[in-house]
Every structure is written in structure tokens, then in C-alpha cells.
Image (spheres, helix red, strand yellow):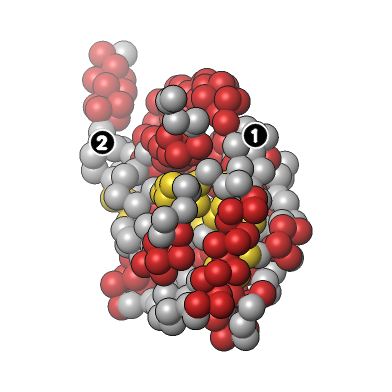
Amino acid sequence: MRYFSLLLGFCLSLPVAAIQVTVTIPPLAGMIQPYLTDEDELVVLLEPGASPHGFQFRPSHLVALQHADLLLTLGNSVDTWIEKPLKQRLSEAQAAGQAIRVIAMQKLPGLVVFPRSTRQQRHLSNQSVTDEQDHHEHEHEHEQEALDPHIWLSIANARLMVSAIAAQLTRLQPDRATEIAAITQQLQADYQRLDQQMTDWLAPVRQQPYLLLHDGYQYFEQAYGLQHLGVVQVSDELKPSIKQVLALRKIIQSTGARCVFKEPQFSDRQLHYIIQGLAVEVGELDPLGQGQLDYRQLMRQMAQAVVQCLQPSPK
């Protein structure tokens, strides 16, 4: 009996096998980070400041994929660049008798997935006054899929995602099952509380008009009753003509927009040229959360950025 107790104590003291988790974009890293131990490794394929559109695989990315015990993807057009390398990796793993667990978030049962916003037709872009060549390349990519891929911008979706993450981690590290369950319970409570906080924060600015440089916030907007007036599209490379500038300025003035939101991945040089002298603020929304690995902080910063730009100025 004493021997059995000693053996059991030894087994319980054995370290849990470390794992490598590879994710395609930072928000997925922000969801799984709270679960990982100091020994586990997290690899984010999309580097801070980079755009997922036009992403090119490098040898280092292939290495991260080859060593991954768990891979998190959105499974849609945002990280479509993972599809071919992943298919090859799964084929190799099967041939070698290896296992790699993959979660494609958009395929999770119960996930809310919207069709692309019909407001795509309301672009306040150079196309309304010029040729198609002035479109952003990433907008062409977006039009090729009927569903809105920005699924992580819904906290309700994120709660489903962390449940799926916890289930796979429990299979990979069964000795941590109790700990993983406790972390999941805490995250679910945190997400629910944050959702209510964001509802309260955003309520006073729901009626404030604003414009976007990128129509990628439908999940966020529908959750909190926001409604943008349109999307200002300008080319980073080509300076707009006087005719284009006047047309866009007229649209901004006629809508009464209080703010135009840009994103850190895209240049706003032409935007500042267009709005010069207008009573409109430039805000910044960062849907990818570049540079930080906590999903809760990502969503909190999104809400705070909206409130800061849309709240009425003190008289």
C-alpha cells in the first residue's frame, strides 16, 4: 500500500507534456493564451502589423505548421492562405501515423455567421467617380465569398470558440483537465461580463454617424446596435483627383459623419488629404489586435476607440 501511494505521488508529480499551438491570426492567440503553461509554445503566423490579405507562406511558417500539436484557424477567407499548406501537412501526418488537431472556427456548430453586409453596395469610394482600378485589392478578395469572415468580432462567437479550444486541449493534456475547465469557466464569465460592459459603454453613441475605410465590423456593429453610414475607399498608391476629393467630401458632409475609422494595417495618407478642413475625426479600430495576446483586451480597446471618437465634444 505504501509502495502504491509513493507510485501514485510520483505519477501525479510528472510534468505535463508541453505542446505547440499554431494560430493563423492574433485574435485566436488571444483566446488560447490563458490556457497555456510556461512550457507550451504559441506561434502566430500573421505577424504584428501585417495584413492577412496577400499573406505569403515562408519556410518558418511551414516549420511552425509541422511542429504544431494544435492548429487554430478561422476556416474562411481571412486565412484562406493556410488551406494548401494545411492539406499537405495533414497528408504527411497521416502517412507518418502522426496526429495534429485542427479547429476551423467557422465550422463550429452554433456559430453565428452573417452573409456579407448588403452595405457593401453603399461604398463611398473612388468607384463612384472613377474606374475599378482604384479598388483595394483586399475588397476584391472579400467579394469572392458570400459570408462575412470577421467572426471573432462577436463575443458570443468567441465563447463558442474557447469551449472548442478547451475540449481539444483537454484531449491533448488530460492531466490538466480540471485546470482547463476552471480557466474555461473564468473566461466564459469574463466574456459575458465584458459583453454587458461594452453594451453599456456603446449605448450613448449608437446614434452617432460614422464611416469606415473597411467594411469588416458587421458582427461588432450588430451586437451593440451601431450602424455605419458607408465605406470610404481610397487608393494608397494613387492620389485622388480634385473631382474625386470633392465628391467624397460632399458625401462626408451630407451624412454628418462624426468620425472616419481607419485600421493600422492600411495607410490613411489619402484619407487625411480628403478630409482636410472638415469637422470629422479620424479614429482607429484594430480588429486583429496587433501586438497583444488577450482577446478581452482586444474587444475592450475596440469599444473604447469607438466611444472616444463618437462621443459628442464638450461645449
Q: Amino acid at mark 2?
A: Pro
Tell which of 109 and 190 is nearer to you.
Answer: 190
- Please tell me which residue is depicted at 30% across the width and 26% down the height of the picture: 12
Q: Are marks 2 and 1 in contact (CB under 8 Å)?
A: no
What is the distance, in whole Å, between disc 2 and disc 1 at their CAs?
54 Å
Tell which of 244 and 90 is nearer to you.
Answer: 244
254 to 198, vertically: above or below: below
**x and y percentages locating residue 220 in the rendered image:** 59, 42
**x and y percentages locating residue 123 in the rendered image:** 65, 65
Tag 2, which secondary structure? Answer: loop
Q: Tell me which numbered mark, 2 or 1, is placed earlier along the sequence.
A: 2
- Please tell me which residue is depicted at 76% across the width and 59% down the height of the picture: 118
Mark 1 nearby-residue class (10 Å; few <14, some 14–19, many ≥20):
few
Q: Which mark is residue 21?
A: none
213 relative position to 250: left or right: left
- Please tell me which residue is depicted at 29% across the width and 30% down the height of the picture: 11
Does residue 27 appear in this view? no
The residue to which callout 2 is attached is 15
The residue to which callout 1 is attached is 207
Q: Amino acid at mark 1?
A: Gln
**The residue positioned farthest toward the top in the image shown:** 1
**x and y percentages locating residue 107 in the rendered image:** 67, 54
Picture quadrant where residue 236 is located: bottom left
Does residue 50 appear in this view? yes
196 relative position to 173: left or right: right
Picture quadrant where residue 146 is located: bottom right
- Please tell me which residue is depicted at 60% across the width and 25% down the height of the picture: 203
